Image (cartoon, rainbow, N blue to C red):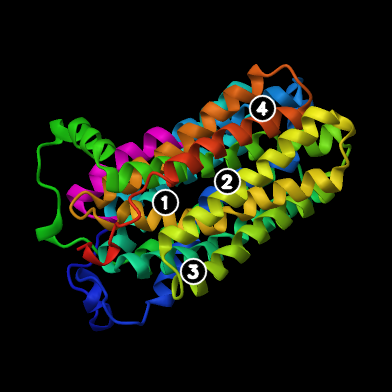
Amino acid sequence: MSVPKSTPPHQSTASTRVRSAELPIAWIMMLGLIVAVGPLSIDMYLPALPSMAKDFGVPTAFIANSVPAYFVGLVFGQLFYGPLSDRIGRVKPLYFGMILYVIASVLCATTNNEYVLFAGRTLQALGACVGAVVTRAAIRDRLTARQTAKAFSIMILVMGLAPILAPSLGALFLQFFSWHSIFWFLAAFGLLNLLLTKFFFFETLTEENRNVRPAKEVLSQYWDLLKDPTFNYPAIGGGLLMGAMFVYISAASELIMDTYGMSSTHFGWIFGMNAAGFVGLTQLNQWLTNRFRILSILRFGAMMQVIASAGLFILGLIFGIDAWLPLVLVCIFFCISGLGLTQPNSSAIALAFQKQRAGMASALQGSLMFSVGIFGGLLLNLFPVNPVLKIGITMFLLMSLGCLLIWRIDRNLNLDDAE
């Protein structure tokens, strides 16, 4: 597929950063649909894990390793797409990633071997992660720092429907079809993303803003980013806070369905409720950014998450699996909902002072999040304790570290100085 050489008149502002009060709402919402392939791929098949484990003849905890297998693809895929998109633009990598995603989804849908499934999930992630990298960078190409925080909130409103609806949709598929049908649906969603890219995603990175440094310097550029305090504190801190959510995703099926005996339908409702809280606070964040400093909102959200994870840790420590389920779910709800205040704002701060390496910054930020998810998954398996304490102590450790780094961000950082 070729990229149009000319840009329609209504898209003529793509090459410059928007300084007016108006945001390109329709464009941002379309980006949200492209990014939604990620959470949809993670969450939709979660209710099917017990039935998949039964088909493969393995424990649910073993087949749940397909979740961190997906995270592995997200980590390395983003690190590849970031510098590539800074060099050749945002559109072409998006085509490549979505085609790979469709092929991998078909592989997952047609396999009856758990190790082929793990490989297919990793390939799925290698394709899907291009959406997150490219869309964050494209928003940075066009918008100011404060507008970027609002844009991420709007985008999450769209992509946030995926984790709200995905588990229930997956459970609905299971009522009529086998788990294979879920991956066929994901393949179709990947095709939809290809169509959106073809007809609605225009190039945002101008020739003069492309990174022309030699490709062999990619590692040194990533290292420079990690040493940059305007990037490392918000990116790593936000990554730790977001990574704790992926710990919850990895452990949710075992905790809610195996430990507390909830059905796949009820699991979908519970999962959707947490996602709805996340999306709700991202929309509140739009209002808050007009009235308070972005850093202040970020710090408040981080403290909310730490307090909620501490509550979950205490419940697991004192009561174990006898902890009252509604109270456990309330703690998890505030852990996940708090991301609505931390993720848009940490991302906006981390990308604010990047320009020619916006794609690399977006990629490294995303990779850090999923690296934490993988690390958290390993921590879950290391603690020989009850499931409530296992998820509580892991989330508390990650969120406490994340909050500490968020508080290390220079309070005098002026985002209006970002170019």
Point out the stretch of residues depicted in magenta: 74-91
State the predominant SS element of the stretch in magenta. Answer: helix
**Marker count (numbered):** 4
Asked whether the viewer can see residue 151, the reply is yes
Residue 9 badge: none
Q: Amino acid at mark 1?
A: Ala
Q: Is residue 139 above or below residue 114?
A: below
Asked whether the viewer can see residue 179, the reply is no
Q: Nearer the viewer, mark 3 or mark 4?
A: 3
What residue sits 90% from the left and 33% below the top? 322
Q: Which residue is mark 4?
A: 112
Residue lying at the far front of the rendered structure: 412
Q: Under tag 3, what secondary structure?
A: helix
Q: Amino acid at mark 2?
A: Ser
Q: Nearer the viewer, mark 3 or mark 2?
A: 3
Number of other residues with Cα within 10 Å of mark 3, as a class: few under 14, some 14 to 19, many 20 or more: many
Q: Which residue is mark 1?
A: 132
Q: Which image quarter is the N terminus in?
A: bottom left
Residue 183 location in percent, x, y?
62, 44
Q: Is residue 42 above or below residue 277?
A: above
Q: CA distance from mark 3 to mark 4?
A: 39 Å
Q: Nearer the viewer, mark 2 or mark 4?
A: 2
Q: Is 77 within the magenta?
A: yes
Residue 134 is left or right of residue 328, and the answer is left
Residue 41 badge: 2
